[in-house]
Amino acid sequence: MVRWNPSWQPHLIERTNVELGSQIKKHRMGQDLSQEDLAAKIYVSRQTVSNWETDKTYPDVENLLLLSVLFDVTIDELIKGDVEAMKEALAEDWKKIRILSWGGLVIALVGVATFLGGVLFWNWDIVPSALLGLLIWGIGMVMLVKVEHLKKEHDLVTYRELIAFSKGEPIDRSNPRSQQARKHRILKIIAMTLAGAIVGGCAGYFGYLFFG
């Protein structure tokens, strides 16, 4: 049985068109509560409840838990069959991460190889070789940047979190390694980009000196 996972990010609810609004309204009316009554019980504004019921906004994890307790239903029952849609959305994003990761890496390496091949074997001038190599390498880097965007969207930083995400398992973001990685996330992305550029540039430069 597919079950709701508390580590899922809120944007999944919006992407998969979960019918939370109608479920909240149904359970609220079933307990003969007004929007004001419900809002008071879970410490939000009446407008917040109204926005939930009209699917303008969506409850966060904490509010989902409060609603499930108040209505005496599980979160699975509250979200109903839309949990499966969330699982499918996660699987689709994991597929994108894999394809973009491997594709971006391969294309970036092809860019470096194109530069070296143009200079060393195909008798191209260094300028067109560099331009074409950088163009191909840049395409690969764009794909890798998209991977980072998807990882950020799902709040994935460490390898262990990626593995859990790929299996649809709960993600532990509270451990020291995950916390430390989040503190230096931007620096890590910049460092990886610079490292890729330096490695490609050095490989081309020394290859040119050695074989040129």
Image (cartoon, rainbow, N blue to C red):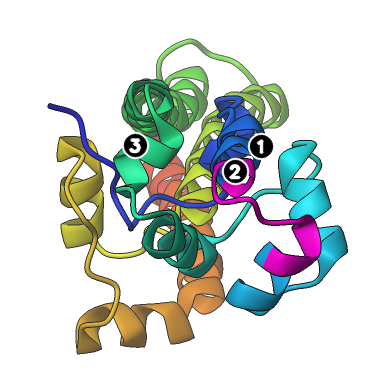
Per the model, the C-alpha gap separating discs 3 and 1 is 13 Å
Q: How many marks?
A: 3
Instruction: Give the residue at mark 1.
Output: 21
Q: Pointer 1: residues within 10 angstroms few (<14), some, or many (20+)?
A: many
| Residue 106 % position (x, y) | 35, 25
Query: Is label 3 in a helix, a strand or a loop?
Result: helix
C-alpha span from label 1 to label 2: 5 Å
Specify few, some or many for label 3: CA neighbours under 10 Å numbering under 14, 14-19, or 20 or more: some
Q: Name the residue under label 2.
A: 24
Contact flag, marks 1 and 2 (Cβ < 8 Å):
yes
Give the residues in magenta.
28-37
Identify residue type, mark 1: Gly
Q: Where is residue 167 in the image (x, y as percent from the top left)?
A: 15, 38
Q: Is the magenta region chiefly helix, strand or loop? A: helix
Real-space CA distance between mark 3 and mark 2, rounded to the nearest whole angstrom = 11 Å
Residue 124 visible in the current orientation: yes
Q: Residue 135 location, x and y as percent?
A: 66, 27
Tell me the amino acid under the disc marked 3: Glu
